[in-house]
Every structure is written in C-alpha cells, then in structure tokens.
Amino acid sequence: MAKAKTGSFILTEKVSLTDNTATQSTIDLGSYVDIGSRTGLAIESVDFTIQGYDVATGAIDDFNATWNADAQVDFQLFDQSETALLPNDNRNLIASGNWLYDATGTSSHDSDVFPDNFGKLSDSRMVINDTLYLLAQNMSNSFVSGNGAYVVVRIKAKLAKLETKDWMAIAIQSTASDN
C-alpha cells in the first residue's frame, strides 16, 4: 500500500481551554502532503497530555491549583474540521481520549476509541488532507478562577508514498466524510 519516504518524526499542537466550550486547533500538513507525488502522512501513534496553567502568567500549575472539584476533559483528533465532539463511529476520527480528575488529586487518562498506537507502516492511519484538527473540551467547567488547561497532542508519523489506487481510495473516503 505505501512505501516510507522518511523516518519517523513528531508533530505537536496544543489547545488552551478556559471554559466548557469545545476549542479547536489545527496542524498544517500542507508542506508534507503532496497530490502530485501521492505523498501522505502515515500516523504511527497519537498521545495526548493535559497541563493546568495560570492564565495571567502562563506558568504551568499542578492540577489542584487548576481544578477545585471533579473534572473531565475530552479530546479528539480529526482529519476533517469538526466543531463539536463526535460519536466514536465518525470516519474522520483518528484518535480520542478523556482525562478524569477528582478533587482528592486522583487522575486517569484513557485513549478510548481507536488504538492510538497504530504500529508499522502497513497499519498506520494514512492522511492525505492538508490539515489535522485537534478538538478538546473541559466538560466540567470547574476551573479555579484565573486558571485553565492545555491539551497537547503528539503525533508520531512519517511521510509515505501511496500507490495511485490507495491514494484515490483515501481521497474518496475523505470526500464522502465531508458530507
């Protein structure tokens, strides 16, 4: 299906949350994806991290300073633009997860949909769109005044040349997902 053109590299992006509104950030892939040479992005793994921060200074805080009650943050990575968290059967969904925190200081993190570790090239999630979209939402709206949280996505990927039939199949699926 694909032949690697590069070794693995890391792409990162963050979203800053300050309330319970879904917030989107984009990752520009325009310099990686090329229609003429059928070069796409082969996503090998996706990791999400959460950090609390002081809004005024930007300094990273511990979670007890960020939340004073139970909290939940949900996040999803898409290959099409989305403005709200979507059900797990959405074809645009690459990876997702959630993070739970309780006021006693206990937290947990789950990748809850697809295997966020795709593995070798033949199992990688191929993307030919020129943008990835990170969407995250603080579901609890319980930030301590003056605090917020970052959701950071780290994507391990490589560039891959696809055969014409595979490129077309991905393009058709992406176009169908737009509707």
Image (cartoon, rainbow, N blue to C red):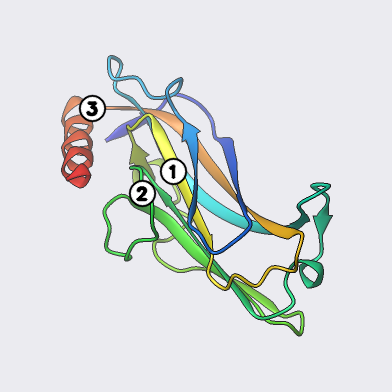
Label 1 close to label 2 by CB (< 8 Å)? yes
Q: Could you tell me residue 152's position as x and y percent? A: 61, 50
The numbered mark, 1 or 2, whose residue comes first in the sequence reads: 2
State the image coordinates of residue 70 (x, y, percent, origin top left): 65, 80
User: Which of the two labelled residues, at mark 3 and mark 1, occupies the earlier sequence position?
Assistant: 1
Give the residue at mark 2: 82
Q: What is the residue that sits farthest to the front in this orientation?
A: 145
Q: Which residue is mark 1?
A: 133
Query: Callout 2, which amino acid?
Result: Glu
Find disc 3 in the rendering and name its residue: 163
* Badge 1 element: strand
Amino acid type at mark 1: Tyr
Q: Position of residue 12 (x, y in %)?
A: 59, 40
Q: Is residue 25 left or right of residue 57?
A: left
Viewer-side residue, 108 vs 70? 70
Give the residue at x 23% y 40%.
174
Whether residue 39 can be seen here: yes
Give me the residue at 68% from left, 76% from top.
107
